[in-house]
Image: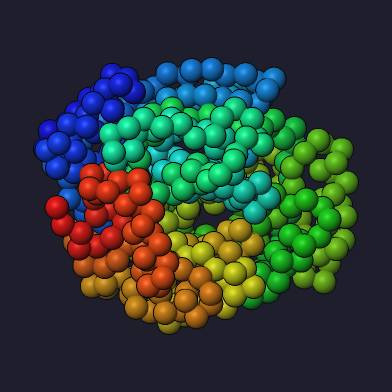
C-alpha cells in the first residue's frame, strides 16, 4: 500500500483531490496508534499526517493552544504541563490496552477517537474543548470551523461532528483547543469491599453532592488480583470504589472531610495522597488492568456507555454470566468489560444487555479476524443510520476517508 507523506496542509488538499480523481480510498493516520480499533478498512493508500506536528501558537494566559493535527500528544502534554496546564478531559492513552507500545498518538487521533478519561463526568469530553479546526473535506476543499474563543459558533458546530468521527468525515490539519489550569491538589477517597450495586449507589451519591467530585470509579476485586493491574499497593484484596476531589489544597481538604461524613452510610472511607492518587487515576483512564500484556490480555474488551443508574446491574450480570471482568468509570456510566474468548466476542449478549439498559457497546479490542466477523461500533437504529449516511455524504460523498472503519462490509 502506498504511503503518502505530506509536508503541509496544501499537500493534504492535493492528495485528497488526486484520490478523488482516481476514486482511491485513503486511510488517514498520524502515528497509527489506534489502527487496531475499528473494522478493517478498504484503502488503497495511507495518508500520513505526522509531519503536521508544529505548535502554531500557545497562549497560556488565554488558555489557548493551536497545533497541527499530527503533533505528538505526549509532546503537547509536556508543553502545557510546563505551564501547569492540562487537557481537562484527560485524553485516554489506549497503547497498553491495545498492546501497541508506548506511543500515545497524535492530537488528531485524540480528537478523531474522542476517548476521554475519568474527568469527563465533570468537564466534558474532547469535543467540548475543541474550539476550532482547519480540515479538508471529501470534496478536496479546505474549510475552517470554529475559532479561538469559546462563544464563536453560528450555524452548525462542525467541531462536534469531527470529534469521534474516527477520520471518516474530513482530514483535520490544524486544531485549536482550550487548555485549563492543572489543579493544585487532588485527593482520592476510597471505599473498600462494596459490591457493584452498592458501589454505584455510593458513586451516585458522591456525584450528586455539592463537593465537586471529578472522578468516580469502581474496581471489583477480580481486576485487582494481578500484579500487572496498575493498582499495586492500593488494594488489599477487596474491591475499591474511588472518588476524586481536586482544586486548591484547603478546598480539597475541606471537601474531603465533608464528603467522608456524607458517605458514612455507604461504608468506611479512607484517603490517598496526591502521588498515589494520580497514578491510580491514570490506570483507570487507560484501563491498565486489562492491558494486552496482562492477565486479561487475550480477552476481547468492550466499552459500554449506559445510564449510570443501570451500570452496576449491567456489569455485574455480564461478569456473572460470562466469567468476565469489569471496571466502572464515570460513576457507572462507562463500563469496560473483558470477556473470555468466543467467535463473536459475545456480541449478541453484550449488545442486547446494553440496549436493554439504555446504552450502547463498542468492541474496543479484538483480533482482526474477530473484528471482521463482528460489528465493532454499535449498530444504529434505521433513522439514526440514515442520518449518519447523510452527514457522511455531505462531507465525503465518494467515501474516500477511512472507508469501512465504522461500518462492517463496506467495499470500494
Taking the view exactly as shown, the residue that stands out farthest to the front is: 155
Q: Is residue 302 visible?
A: no
User: In the image, residue 335 lies at what x, y percent?
Assistant: 51, 64
Residue 70 falls in image quadrant: top left
Which residue is more in the foreground, 279 or 402?
Answer: 402
The image shows residue 334, relative to residue 214, as above or below, that is below
User: Which residue is at a point 26% across and 72% down the rendered structure image?
Assistant: 344
User: Which residue is at a point 14% across and 52% down the rendered structure image?
Assistant: 412
User: Which residue is at a point 28% across and 34% down the rendered structure image?
Assistant: 140
The image shows residue 258, relative to residue 128, as above or below, that is below
Q: Is residue 95 left or right of residue 42?
A: right
User: Which residue is at a point 34% across and 73% down the rendered structure image?
Assistant: 347
Q: Number of labelled discs?
A: 0
User: In the image, residue 331 lies at what x, y percent?
Assistant: 64, 62
- Colouring scheme applied when the structure was drawn: rainbow
Which residue is more in the foreground, 346 or 57?
Answer: 57
User: In the image, residue 382 lies at what x, y percent?
Assistant: 37, 72
Q: Is residue 393 visible?
A: yes
User: In the image, residue 256 lies at what x, y percent?
Assistant: 82, 50
Q: Is residue 185 left or right of residue 113?
A: right
Quadrant of the frame with the N terminus: top left
Q: Is residue 188 left or right of residue 388?
A: right
Q: Is residue 186 left or right of residue 170?
A: right
Amino acid at each position: 500500500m502506498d504511503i503518502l507523506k505530506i509536508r503541509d496542509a496544501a499537500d493534504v488538499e492535493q492528495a485528497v483531490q488526486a484520490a478523488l480523481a482516481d476514486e482511491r480510498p485513503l486511510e488517514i493516520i498520524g502515528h497509527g496508534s489506534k489502527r487496531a480499533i475499528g473494522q478493517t478498512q478498504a484503502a488503497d493508500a495511507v495518508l500520513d499526517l505526522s509531519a503536521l506536528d508544529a505548535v502554531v501558537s500557545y497562549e497560556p494566559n488565554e488558555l489557548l493552544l493551536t497545533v497541527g493535527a499530527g503533533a505528538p500528544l505526549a509532546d503537547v502534554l509536556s508543553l502545557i504541563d510546563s505551564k501547569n496546564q492540562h487537557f481537562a478531559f484527560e485524553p485516554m492513552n489506549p497503547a497498553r490496552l491495545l498492546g501497541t507500545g508506548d506511543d500515545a498518538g497524535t492530537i488528531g487521533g485524540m480528537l478523531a477517537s474522542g476517548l476521554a478519561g475519568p474527568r469527563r463526568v465533570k468537564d466534558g469530553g474532547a469535543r467540548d474543548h475543541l474550539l476550532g479546526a482547519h480540515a479538508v473535506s471529501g470534496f478536496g476543499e479546505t474549510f475552517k470551523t470554529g475559532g479561538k474563543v469559546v462563544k464563536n459558533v453560528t450555524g452548525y458546530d462542525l467541531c462536534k461532528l469531527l470529534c469521534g468521527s474516527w477520520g471518516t468525515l474530513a482530514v483535520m490539519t490544524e486544531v485549536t483547543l482550550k487548555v485549563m489550569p492543572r489543579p493544585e491538589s487532588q485527593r482520592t477517597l476510597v471505599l473498600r469491599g462494596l459490591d457493584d450495586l452498592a458501589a454505584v449507589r455510593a458513586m451516585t451519591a458522591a456525584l450528586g453532592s455539592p463537593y465537586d467530585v471529578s472522578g468516580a470509579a469502581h474496581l471489583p476485586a477480580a481486576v485487582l488480583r494481578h500484579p500487572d493491574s496498575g493498582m499495586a499497593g492500593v488494594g488489599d484484596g477487596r474491591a475499591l470504589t474511588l472518588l476524586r476531589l481536586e482544586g486548591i489544597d484547603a478546598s480539597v481538604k475541606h471537601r474531603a472531610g465533608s464528603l467522608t461524613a456524607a458517605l458514612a452510610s455507604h461504608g468506611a472511607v479512607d484517603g490517598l495522597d496526591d502521588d498515589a492518587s494520580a497514578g491510580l487515576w491514570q490506570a483507570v483512564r487507560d484501563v491498565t488492568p486489562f492491558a494486552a500484556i496482562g492477565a486479561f490480555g487475550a480477552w476481547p474488551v468492550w466499552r459500554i456507555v449506559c445510564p449510570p443508574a443501570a451500570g452496576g446491574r449491567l456489569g455485574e450480570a455480564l461478569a456473572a454470566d460470562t466469567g468476565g471482568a469489569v471496571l466502572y468509570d464515570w460513576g457507572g456510566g462507562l463500563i469496560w468489560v473483558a470477556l473470555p474468548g468466543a467467535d463473536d466476542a459475545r456480541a449478541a449478549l453484550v449488545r442486547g444487555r446494553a440496549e436493554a439498559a439504555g446504552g450502547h457497546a463498542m468492541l474496543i479490542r479484538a483480533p482482526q479476524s474477530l473484528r471482521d466477523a463482528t460489528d465493532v461500533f454499535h449498530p444504529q437504529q434505521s433513522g439514526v443510520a440514515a442520518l449518519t449516511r447523510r452527514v457522511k455524504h455531505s462531507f465525503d460523498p465518494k467515501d474516500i476517508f477511512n472507508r469501512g472503519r465504522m461500518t462492517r462490509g463496506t467495499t470500494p
